[in-house]
Image: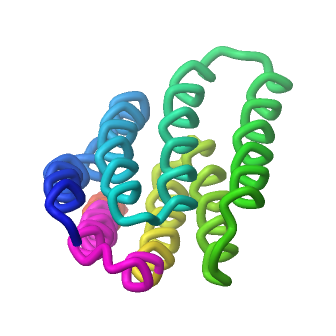
Amino acid sequence: MNTPSIIFSVLGILTTFVVFQIKNKNRLLIFNALSNSFYTLSMLFLGAYIGALLLSIAILRDFIYIKLKDRPKWYVYTSFMFINVLSIVSAIFTYGHWFDIAILLASILINYGMWQTNAIVIRVTSIITSITFIIYNIIHAGYLNIITEALVIISCVIFLVRLLIKYYKDV
C-alpha cells in the first residue's frame, strides 16, 4: 500500500465503525457515502479501478436512496435498477480480473440491501459484501481496507446481537 491509500483507508476506518451502529437509515446512508468516498480514493491509489468505480456508484446510490422516501413505487424501483445497470456497465468497462465479477455481484447485493427498509437485511447483505471485499482487497494489497471490512462485519454482528437481546427481553 502507498501512503495516500493508507491515509484514505485510515479515514475510512474511522467512519466505518460508526456506520453500522446508526439506526436512522438516512444518517446511515450519509455516513456510508462518506466512508465510501475515502475507500474510493484508497482503491484508486491501489489501482483497483473496478472497486473504486463501484464504490463511487455506491456513493451515488446512498444519496439517491436518501431521497426515495415518499416517492412512488415506480421511482423507487427505477432508481434501484438504474444503480444496478450502472454498476454492470461500469464493470464491463473496467474488467481486469476474474474476481471482478464477484465484486460486481457483491455490489448488486449491497444495492439490494441498502434499498430495503429492514435493518437486518441491510446488515446481513453488508456482511456478505464485506467478506467479498476482503478477498478483493487481498488480491489488490489493500490490507488496511481488510481491517475495515472486518470492522464492518463486527459492527453488523454487534448490531444483530443487540437486536436479538432486545427481542428476547421483550418476549
Q: Position of residue 5 (x, y in %)?
A: 24, 59
Looking at the picture, tell me which residue is in the foreground, 42 or 162: 42
Q: Position of residue 16 (x, y in %)?
A: 25, 53
User: For the point 22% across and 58% down, which residue is it?
Assistant: 9
107 in the magenta segment? no
Q: Position of residue 91 (x, y in %)?
A: 70, 59
Q: Position of residue 163 (x, y in %)?
A: 33, 60
Looking at the picture, tell me which residue is in the foreground, 54 or 112: 54
Please indicate whether residue 76 sits to the left or right of residue 115 in the image.
Answer: right
Is residue 163 shown above or below 105?
above
Q: How is the image coloured?
A: rainbow
Is residue 46 visible to us here?
yes
Looking at the rendering, which quadrant does residue 94 occupy? Answer: bottom right
User: For the point 14% across and 61% down, which residue is it?
Assistant: 3
User: For the point 78% across and 51% down, which residue is it?
Assistant: 89
Segment colored magenta:
136-159
Please indicate whether residue 51 sits to the left or right of residue 37 in the image.
Answer: right
Is residue 132 shown above or below 165?
below
